[in-house]
Amino acid sequence: MPKTIRRLGVLTGGGDCPGLNAVIRAVTKDAIYHGMEVLGIEDGFLGLIENRIRPLCYDDVSNILTQGGTILGSSNKANPIRFAVGRNPDGTPIFKDVTSDCLRHIEQHGIDALVVIGGDGTMACAAPFIDHGICTVGVPKTIDNDLWGTDLTFGFMTAVQTATDAIDKVHTTAASHHRAMVVEVMGRNAGWIALHAGVASGADVILLPENPFDLDKVCHTVERRGKRGRRFTIICCAEGAYPRDGEKVVERVDPTSPDPIRLGGVSKWLAGAIEARTGVESRYVVLGHVQRGGSPVAEDRVLATLFGDHAMDLLKEGRVNRLVAWQNGRLTDVDLRESAGRQRLVPDGHPIVEAARSVGTDFGD
Ligand code: F6P
C-alpha cells in the first residue's frame, strides 16, 4: 500500500539553469490543488543539512514561470554523506557524514516525500535517502543535457539558444576581421551544447569532449577555407574538448563539490595554437555562466511543467524513488538510483553529428 503523502519537501541542487522555477511552480500548484503542503528547502541539500526549510504557498510560486534561476537557491557542494565541515592544517577539507542531521530535519518538519530537482550530482546525493526509507522523486535538470536515463533535461534548450545567439554575433565580427574565432561553450564532459549550438549556428568546426581532436586537422580546415576565399572560421568548442595528444583543461578544482573538476580554458589555448600554426589572426570567447542565466525558452517552460506534473503523478500513485525522464519523444520515468552520478555522453555516429558532417562541418577528427 503506497504511503499517503501529505507534505512534500522540494529542493533544487547543483548548478542552476533556466526552468527550475517552472518546475517548482508546477509541483507546488499541483500539490496545493490536491490538498498537500509544500516546504521549500533552501540551497539544495545544504538547506536540508542546515535546517533551512520554509513553507511554499500559492503566492510564492505565482508569476515565476518565466524567471531564470531558482527561488529556493542552489548549491553544488553539499553532499550529506561527504559534507565539508572544516579544514585540516594543510588546507584540505575535513568531511563528515551528516545524513542523520538531514533525516532528523525531515522528521521534524513532517516531510513525507522529497522532490529533488537536479542533475547526476544531486541524484547521487538523493540516492542514500531512498535507502533510509525516504520517498523521493527526481526531476532532471541541467544545461549539459548529460543525465543518464533521460534524452532531455530542462534548461538545455535555453542554453543552446543562448550559445547559438552568441555564435551568430561572433560570426559577423569574424567575417569582418578575417579571423578564426573559437567559442567555448559549457557542458562538462558532454558535448551536447557544443553539438546543438554548433549545428544551429553553422559553425565550421565543432569540437566535442567525446572525440579528441587533431590540431593539424583543425588548422588545415582554417587554411583550406582561406584558400577558397572564406577568410574566417568559426569553431564551436566544448569546454571539455581536448587534443588527441593532450588533456582536458581544468580551470579549478573544488574538493568540496561532488564533481570537483571545473573545466575551462581550452579556447584560449586553441586560438593561440591556430594563430601560431596558420598565421590567421585568432580570438577566443568563453560564454561561461551566461548559458545558465535568463528566462527559459518556451520549450523549456513546457518541458519543466510536464516534468513537474509527472513528478506529482508519481507521488500521487505511490510510484516513488523514480526519476522523471524523456525517452524517445515521450514522458516516462526510470529508477532514480540508476541515474545517480551517471553521465550521458554524445554517442559515436549520433545522427546530428552525421548530419553536420554531411554539410561539411569538421569535427577535428
Ligand atoms: O553542470 C552545469 C555547469 O554549468 C557545467 O556546464 C559547467 O562545467 C559547470 O556547471 C560550472 O560549474 P560552476 O558553476 O561551479 O562554475
Image (cartoon, rainbow, N blue to C red):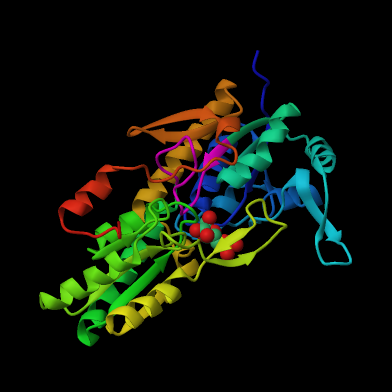
Q: Is residue 51 visible?
A: no
In this rendered view, identify the residue nearer to me: 327 or 182. 182
In this rendered view, identify the residue nearer to me: 244 or 148. 244
Residue that appears at 87% across and 62% down: 88
Count how many numbered circles sit on residues in the image: 0
Residue that appears at 44% across and 61% down: 245
Q: Position of residue 69 (x, y in %)?
A: 54, 60
Residue 28 within the magenta-colored segment of the rendering: no
Q: Position of residue 6 (x, y in %)?
A: 68, 30
In the depicted structure, whether residue 291 falls above or below residue 324: below
Q: Is residue 114 left or right of residue 242?
A: right
The image quadrant where one finds the N terminus is top right
In the depicted structure, whether residue 170 falls above or below residue 313: below
Name of the residue lying farthest toward the left:
228
Q: Is residue 215 left or right of residue 138?
A: left
Question: Which contiguous range is marked in magenta?
Answer: 138-153
Q: Is residue 285 visible?
A: yes
Residue 141 within the magenta-colored segment of the rendering: yes
Q: Position of residue 122 (x, y in %)?
A: 62, 45
In this rendered view, identify the residue nearer to me: 273 or 254. 273
In this rendered view, identify the residue nearer to me: 109 or 363. 363
Q: Position of residue 214 (x, y in %)?
A: 34, 62
Quarter of the image where one finds residue 319: top right
Quarter of the image where one finds residue 261: bottom right
Q: Is residue 131 left or right of residue 357?
A: right
